[in-house]
Image (cartoon, rainbow, N blue to C red):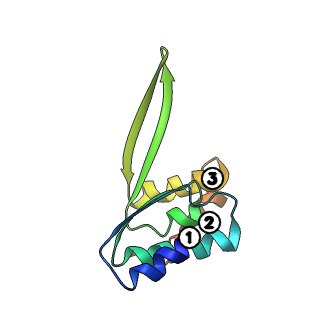
Amino acid sequence: MLAIRLSQERIEPGATYVFDEVDAGIGGETATAVGAKLKELGQRNQVLTITHLPQIASEASSHVVVAKATAEGRTLTKIQKVEGEERRRELARMLSGRIDEASLAHARELLVGER
């Protein structure tokens, strides 16, 4: 689907694309390549991507975290834009499920070249 959108975009830029969990069934180098393609598509279009992979999230120009919690039988949703150090910590959490020196270092590597 992403390849089709990229070919269409060359003809008609300025569209809005939504990719829900585009990362299903991929990881590693493939996820890195998908992240790069989404970034390319987003240079002339609006792209909203829901992902659980830090390789994809690290390519975004804007990073929003959505968290759900249940309290007293109700589901609460928290939406927060993360930037700078907070973003690096979120990528570290996405990488390993915890925030430690190793995951922070890896997150820093993912963000190299960030605007």
Element type at mark 1? helix
Which label was assigned to residue 27? none
Check disc 3 and report the residue beneath it.
Answer: 100
Q: Residues within 10 Å of mark 3 (few under 14, many from 20)?
A: few
* Residue designated by label 2: 106
112 relative to 26 in the view: left or right: left
**Residue sitting at x 51%, y 53%:** 90
Give the residue displayed 54% in from the left and 57% down from the top.
91
Outermost residue on the bottom side: it is: 10
**Image marks 1 and 2: residues in contact by CB distance under 8 Å:** yes
- The outermost residue toward the left is 14
Question: Residue 71: horizontal and vertical position, in percent?
Answer: 48, 19
Tell me: residue 50, above or below residue 29.
above
Asked which quadrant contains residue 63, the reply is bottom left
C-alpha distance separating marks 3 and 2: 10 Å
Q: Label 1 sits on what residue type?
A: Leu
Camera-side residue of 112 and 33: 33
* Residue at which label 1 appears: 110
Image position, residue 98 (x, y; %) = 63, 47
Relative image position of residue 42 (x, y in whole percent): 39, 73
Indicate which disc, 3 or 2, sits on the residue closer to the N terminus: 3
Q: What residue is drawn where x is 51% and y is 62%? A: 57
